Each structure stands twice: as C-alpha cells, then as structure tokens.
Amino acid sequence: MKSAVSVSQDTLVSPSADAALAAAVGGRASAYLSLTKPRIVLMVLITVGVGFLLGARGSAHPMTFTLTLLGTGLVAGGASTLNQYLERSRDALMRRTARRALPSGRLASPEAAIFGAALGLIGTLILLVGVNGLAAATALVTLLLYVYVYTPLKPYTTLNTAIGAVPGALPPVIGWTAATGSLSIEAWVLFLIVFLWQFPHFLAIAWIYRDDYARGGMKMLPGVDPRGTMTGRQSTLYALALVPAGLLPSIVGLAGPFYFVGAMILGLAYLESAARFWSCVNDATARRLLRASIVYLPAVLLLLVLNPMPA
Ligand code: HEM
Ligand SMILES: CC(C)=CCC/C(C)=C/CC/C(C)=C/COP(=O)(O)OP(=O)(O)O
C-alpha cells in the first residue's frame, strides 16, 4: 500500500517536476546565451565572413571558413560575456541593461566569468589549431582590447567609444587573416570602414540612452554635451569621412564599379541621417541615424560580396 501511494505520488509529482526542471534548465540555457549578446555576435560574424570571402578571392576552403566563423563566434561571445561580468553592478543601475542575466540574478557572477573565459579560450584554440596563428592572435587581441581596455574605461572617459571602435573594427581583419595568413592593405581598408561607421552608430545610441548612461556612471559624449552640438557634429564628420573611405575597396582592387556606386549612395544616405541629427539633435533624429547605421553596414558588406574584383 505504502509503495502504491509513493508510486502514485511519483507519477503525479514527476511530470510537473520534470517540467519545472526543464523550464529551469531552459531558462538557464537562455540566460547563458543572452550573456553572449547573440545579435552583436551575428553582426560580428557577418563582418568576419566578408573579410574571409574577400581574402579568399573565390577559392574559400569550406572547412577553414566554418572553423573561422565558429572560433571567432566563440571568442566574440566570450568577450561579451566577460564584458557583462565586469559591468554587472553598473548594468543593474541602467534601465536598458537591468534585466540582463547577472544584474537580475538569473545567473551567479562566477558562472559568467568561467563561461566567458571558457568560450574565449576554446574559440582562440579553434582558430589556432584549425585556421592559423595570425587569425587566433588577432581575435585574442580583439577580446583583450574590448574586455580589458574599452570596458574598464567606460566610467572614466568619453574617449572610451573611440577606443572601443578599434576592437569593434577588427573582426573583418580576423576574417582576412584567416583566409590569407597576412595583414595586407585590403584588411586595413575593411578595418577603416567599420571603424568610421561606428561613430555615428554609437553616438546616436549614446544620445538616446544619455540619461541611462548617466545613471550607470558611464561617461559618454552627450553627458558633457547636453545640447548635443558636439555629438551631432562628430557623427556628421565621421559619416563624411566614411563616404570616401567606403569607396576605397574599389581603389585597392577589392571591389568593382557596382560596389563603388552602391557604396557612394549608401554613404551619402548615412551622411544625410547624421547631418539631419546634427541640424536638430533629438531622440527621433538619433533613432533615424541608428536605423541608418544598422542598414549601412550590412548593405555595404553585401555589395562587397556581390561585386568583388576578379582575382
Ligand atoms: C564602440 C562601439 C560600439 C558601441 C558602444 C555599440 C553600442 C551598441 C548598443 C548599446 C546597442 C544597443 C542599442 C539598443 O538597445 O537600442 C547596439 C546595437 C547594435 N550594434 Fe553596436 N556598438 C558598437 C559597435 C558595434 C559593432 C562593431 C557592431 C557590429 C559589427 C555593432 C552592431 C550592432 C547591431 C547589429 C546592433 C542592433 C542589435 C541590437 O539591438 O542588439 N555595434 N550597439
Ligand atoms: C572576436 C571578438 C572579440 C569580437 C568582438 C568585437 C566587438 C568588440 C564587438 C562589440 C563592439 C562594441 C564595443 C559594442 C558595445 O559594447 P558595450 O559593452 O558598450 O554594450 P552594452 O552597453 O550593451 O554592454
């Protein structure tokens, strides 16, 4: 009788316990995934992929390509995780980030630190063993600059974003070195485009979230520029510099005339959004500029892949 009761209890209790366990495991898995900032990783991988395909000039080795994306994706996810680990207290103070896995307590911080370090290490080893030493070293330098230079500087200087733009622009260089084993001029042209592109991107974001950044104690330009004059001017100047920089792939023999025309149109459209932001600095023009930034980069990268210069 006793055992019958316990069996019936088990059968009653187990399914809901299993569901709770599954929900907990699923919840933890999604919390771990969120630490890697998947949308940024996806965009980073697109820039890596384009760098690789241009470097390979039509003879990409599928296995090397796959290992490059896998290794760099893991390093990028590890970098974002370590960034969230280091910023957990400040993230708790900002509305945009307060619900993240660490400030909300869904994961404990040592778990995040171990997860981030493991992803970074495994990703670097995959690049080292499966791709080449230069790609592995470039990815590791990218992680170190992002996690240990840019991230700690955010509460101290408004220059943090200009410094963060260096690791932000290195992923296409990782892709290029993975395909070619060298750091040639073409890699630096791709670096320059992504570097300049980031200024209007993050200045628009810094304006939109200016109160939030101030709450978290992050030093961003709009915090010392309440009318937004410098923020608007800098966005416009960097977007202006990006117009000729965006044409360089055709000049160094990376892309053809179709790319040249497309990049010119996209560059002018991005510049127009930045100039409109400068002429009237407000949340609406900043959001429009942010949207333009998220269109510009994938579109230019797509054109590069669609209209490469024949080898
Ligand atoms: C210093 C450089 C950068 C800073 C400070 C920065 C900051 C940010 C922030 C705070 C957001 C979230 C905006 C929101 O929630 O409304 C964002 C969105 C985004 N960023 Fe950046 N970013 C930088 C560089 C980059 C780079 C290098 C890439 C990719 C190559 C990138 C791709 C994106 C994309 C695709 C989004 C939209 C997806 C999303 O909302 O998560 N960013 N950026
Ligand atoms: C291979 C490798 C390591 C790739 C990583 C490339 C990289 C540095 C991408 C992110 C660029 C960046 C500075 C985003 C903002 O982060 P944030 O921390 O200021 O954003 P948050 O305010 O949302 O935390």
Image (tube, rainbow, N blue to C red):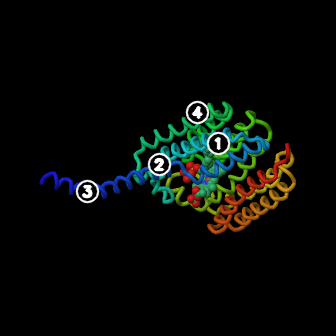
| Image point (64%, 59%), residue name | 204
Indicate which disc residue 66 carries. 1
Give the position of the C terminus as an image quadrant: top right
Query: Does any atom of ligand 2 lie closer than 8 Å to the CB of label 1?
Result: no
Q: Nearer the viewer, residue 197 or 19?
A: 19
Q: Nearer the viewer, residue 198 or 214?
A: 198
Label whose residue precedes the other's in the sequence (3 or 1)? 3
Find residue 233 and report its horizontal and vertical position in percent.
Answer: 72, 58
| Image point (30%, 55%), residue name | 17
In this image, 309 relative to 159: left or right?
right
Depth check, mark 4 against mark 3: the one in front is 3
Q: Nearer the viewer, residue 286 or 114?
A: 114
Q: What secondary structure is found at the residue carrying circle 3?
A: helix
Label whose residue precedes the other's in the sequence (2 or 1)? 2
Report which residue position mark 2 lands on: 32
| Image point (73%, 66%), residue name | 276
At label 2, the amino acid type is Tyr
At label 3, the amino acid type is Thr
At label 1, the amino acid type is Thr
Measure the C-alpha gap from mark 2 to mark 1: 23 Å
Q: What secondary structure is found at the residue carrying circle 1?
A: helix
Indicate which disc residue 11 carries. 3
